[in-house]
Image (cartoon, rainbow, N blue to C red):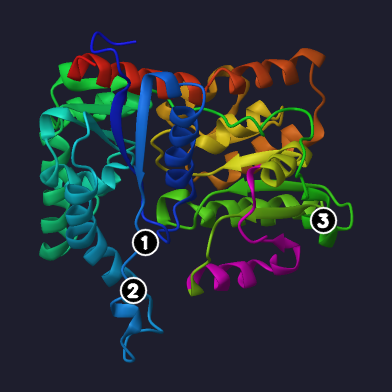
């Protein structure tokens, strides 16, 4: 216990309900579970998770357009949530912002007792590398407000050394304020089935055919275009092979790409799955493909490894840092090299020890350790 003989009072500021970012939901929920369970003797946690304001979506002229959701996100991020954070979290010893895209909340909190978890630099790309991501002035103004919140925070957590190096290279945060706190793997992800796994039902449409798995959204940096091209090439040699994709709401252009490649009949996209069922999909997949051109960490890599499943991932420093030598790497966007790598994996056998090495690598990432690092940091920061 701290020298003040009471637990730290910590406000946990999570992404609003309805944002639709599973990885950010997981990060917040995992911390809440740890602070309410194994670490409860050391912390009193107040979790804040408002709903997205439904203002624009109630307007008749906008309600059917995606623009309405984005407008409600902006209103929530920059008006409603900061006001709620300032009112709801009074009397706390420390404040933890789970997602750096909500770093603007720091402007409404005591910055000297607030930390932000920076998962990647995507939210600030239009400012630090405008040639790579040109954006209109209004968007850059929002990004600037968010970045200034991050820079005001007393602590900035990061999950990989690659993210740390990028923050330092762009001179966004001083090194003494950075704390390494890698994410973890939830208990459901392991080599053996767990209660609640309904993956057999989810996979029933495949009729027992083998499949490769992709877990992630359809945003540009995930490169689902590469995923589709590689799968189409693989299917010429393996006509029974199927592709299971979890998490992407495909755009019209992406759906058209699928149709042009003639793979629509081999693509299965289940609705959002619980962790037990997703773990079942990982375990039964022939391989998990991570085709991204940029990542801040790569949760599907360690989740798949923890389940013992083979992974082929883009050859990015961050993914090599996370996956080590238990993952097969292919050059970003190189369809031929990707196809060859996956083909070789599908047709090869491996030593008996390889699966256990993958499981060990994946299970080496722990949400308990993640939470403990964050909590210890706030204890040192506040003296509690």
Residue 235 locus on image (x, y percent): 75, 54
Name the residue that disc number 3 marks: 201
- Residue range of the region highlighted in magenta in the rendering: 253-275
Name the residue that disc number 2 marks: 54
* Residue extending furthest toward the front: 5
* Residue extending furthest toward the bottom: 60
Front residue of 133/72: it is: 72
Location of residue 17 (image quadrant): bottom left
Front residue of 341/103: it is: 103
Q: Quadrant of the N terminus?
A: top left
The secondary structure type at the circle numbered 3 is helix
- From the viewer's perspective, tell me whether residue 295 is left or right of residue 324: left
Residue 89 locus on image (x, y percent): 23, 43
Front residue of 245/341: it is: 245
- What label sits on residue 51 in the rendered view? 1
Whether pointer 1 and pointer 3 mark residues with C-beta atoms closer than 8 Å, the reply is no
Mark 3 is surrounded, within 10 Å at the Cα level, by few (under 14), some (14 to 19) or many (20 or more) other residues, namely few
Whether pointer 2 and pointer 1 mark residues with C-beta atoms closer than 8 Å, the reply is yes
Tag nearer the camera, 2 or 3: 2
Which of the two discs, 2 and 3, labels the residue nearer the N terminus? 2
Tag nearer the camera, 1 or 3: 1
């Amino acid at each position: 216990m701290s020298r003040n003989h009471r637990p730290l009072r910590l406000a946990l500021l999570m992404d609003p309900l309805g944002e639709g970012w599973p990885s950010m939901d997981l990060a917040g929920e995992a911390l809440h579970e740890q602070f309410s369970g194994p670490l409860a003797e050391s912390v009193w946690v107040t979790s804040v998770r408002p709903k997205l304001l439904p203002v624009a979506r109630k307007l008749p002229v906008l309600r059917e357009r995606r623009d309405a959701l984005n407008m409600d996100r902006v209103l929530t991020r920059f008006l409603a949530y900061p006001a709620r954070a300032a009112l709801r979290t009074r009397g706390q010893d420390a404040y933890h912002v789970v997602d750096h895209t909500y770093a603007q909340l720091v402007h409404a909190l005591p910055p000297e007792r607030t930390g932000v978890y920076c998962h990647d630099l995507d939210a600030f790309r239009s400012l630090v590398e405008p040639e790579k991501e040109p954006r209109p002035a209004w968007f850059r103004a929002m990004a600037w407000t968010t970045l200034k919140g991050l820079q005001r925070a007393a602590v900035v957590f990061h999950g990989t050394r690659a993210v740390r190096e990028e923050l330092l290279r762009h001179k966004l945060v001083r090194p003494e304020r950075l704390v390494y706190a890698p994410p973890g793997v939830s208990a459901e992800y392991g080599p053996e089935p767990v209660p609640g796994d309904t993956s057999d039902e989810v996979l029933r449409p495949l009729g027992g055919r083998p499949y490769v798995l992709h877990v992630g959204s359809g945003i540009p940096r995930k490169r689902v275009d590469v995923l589709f091209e590689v799968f189409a090439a693989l299917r010429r040699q393996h006509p029974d092979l199927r592709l299971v994709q979890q998490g992407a709401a495909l755009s019209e252009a992406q759906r058209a790409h699928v149709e042009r490649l003639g793979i629509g009949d081999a693509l299965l996209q289940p609705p959002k799955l619980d962790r037990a069922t997703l773990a079942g999909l990982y375990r039964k997949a022939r391989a998990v493909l991570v085709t991204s051109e940029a990542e801040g960490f790569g949760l599907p890599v360690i989740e798949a490894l923890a389940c013992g499943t083979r992974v082929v991932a883009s050859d990015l420093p961050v993914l090599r840092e996370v996956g080590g030598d238990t993952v097969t790497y292919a050059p970003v966007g190189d369809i031929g090299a990707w196809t060859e790598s996956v083909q070789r994996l599908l047709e090869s056998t491996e030593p008996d020890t390889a699966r256990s090495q993958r499981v060990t690598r994946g299970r080496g990432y722990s949400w308990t350790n993640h939470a403990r690092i964050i909590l210890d940091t706030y204890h040192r920061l506040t003296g509690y």
